[in-house]
Image (cartoon, helix red, strand yellow):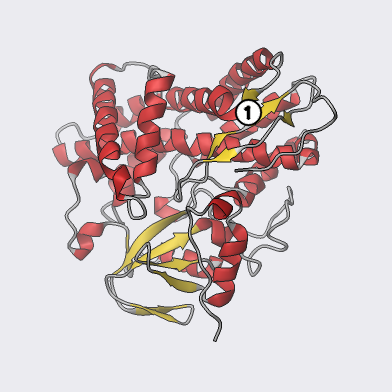
Amino acid sequence: MLAAPTYDPLDTETLIDPYPALAALRAYAPASWHEGMRSWVLTRYGDCVAVLRDHEGFARDRRRVGVVVAEPSLSVQSMDPPDQAPVRGLFVNALRAQDIRGIEHRAYVSLAERLQRLAVSESFDVMADVAVPFSLGVVSDLLGVEQPDVRSFSASSDAIMRSMDAGLDPAVVAPGICARAELTALVDSWFRSSTGPGLLADVRAHADAGDSAIDLYIRNTARVMFQGGYSTMVAAVGNVVDVLLRHPWALDAMRDPTVLNSGVDELVRFEGPVQGTSRIATRTCEIGGSTVHDGDIVLVHFAGANRDPAQFRKPNQLFLDRAEGRHLGFGWGTHSCIGTVSAQAALRALIRALHEQPCVLRATGAASRRRTATMRVFDHLPATFRPVRGGATSRSST
């Protein structure tokens, strides 16, 4: 029997390119027990979707298996159907009421102006100079709130994002708790004083003001949506730009509006921001030939599923017109990202703004990945619009 392949999501080589390790896991056993994470890791598309669909057999809400969940963690993402429906419905309906085309246009105009200013630089950091301010502006516009200070909010968001890897690094727990409390206070201030139009105003207008339990979930969901939408978009922007730097033909192909729409989806499948999500088995069952016991944690690996050759033809290649079914880059079903539509709009705005620049975007040095497992994100991604001396610069991630 073949020895189990080693999979360390925080290993340097895996951070650079996780897909060979995920392919090896899939070939060895679609459901593999990971001792370090104390969970089953699923890498096959069909298994991942089956678990995400089975709310009875696999709980997102840990209270269903006797785990005490702190109030700040109670949101639409921590609930299961049917209890989740009222809160999720409020946010989904509010999102549908937003002017997404207007948000996309404002994002495009703002980013095009920013890129014009950066075009004179010998080099700039796509993450700090583009992804962070762009993403914070889009999510603030969507919710209809005053944009927080970029530097302080970015630091708090990073602490929360890192705390998602608490199973691999317990040291990230305490900073995450403090940052979550800071963000909760910010959201509470919006509920007290924010009067502008936007998603938050629509949610407040249609919520039952007399239901304190629902109010808690609404406030926490607003926090999760703001921070999660921001951090996911920051990661997505960096990943998309990185793919376009390595596949410059793709940017030109997406000048076609039809290719742009399908291309944005393919870019997220190819190099998505969120790597996975977890569920807890509520009964003993079999997945991919392995016995998963009642109470076991199951990690649904989005990145593994999105490169499954049984679902996607030549999954390690970029096909901007790919049409083989829905990827898991934004999750699935009732726990998928509520802001998927706005995130897609923001990525379209990003690509359109890149089209407007007179010079081609080029890499200027080595990029570096953040040492995080749940979110696949760059720390630094240096680039320029100016001609690189000596020709195009090859780039390797570190």
Query: Dot 1, how many residues are within 10 Å of its Cα: few (below 14), some (14-19), or many (20+)?
Result: many
Image spot of residue 120 (x, y percent): 71, 13
Looking at the rendering, in which quadrant would you find the C terminus?
A: top right
Q: Residue 260: name its quadrant.
A: top right
**Position above or below: 170 against 159:** below
What residue type is disc 1 on? Answer: Ala
Q: Residue at x 20, y 38 (%)?
A: 216
Q: Residue 124: name its quadrant.
A: top right
Left or right of 328? Residue 240 is right
Could you say which is closer to the camera, residue 362 or residue 236? 362
Q: Residue 286: name its quadrant.
A: bottom left
> Furthest-right residue in view?
390
**Position above or below: 207 against 262:** above
Left or right of 263? Residue 288 is left
**Position above or below: 110 against 304:** above
Looking at the rendering, in which quadrant would you find the N terminus?
A: bottom right
| Total marks placed | 1
Res 33 visible: yes
Q: Residue at x 28, y 70 (%)?
A: 282
Left or right of 174? Residue 55 is right
Q: Residue at x 77, y 20 (%)?
A: 386
Q: For numbered disc 1, what is the local secondary structure?
A: helix
**Position above or below: 97 against 83:** above
Image spot of residue 9 (x, y percent): 48, 56
Could you say which is closer to the camera, residue 54 or residue 31? 31
Res 307 visible: no
For label 1, the residue is 349
Image spot of residue 293 (x, y percent): 31, 77
Could you say which is closer to the camera, residue 391 or residue 91? 391
Image spot of residue 151 (x, y percent): 42, 21
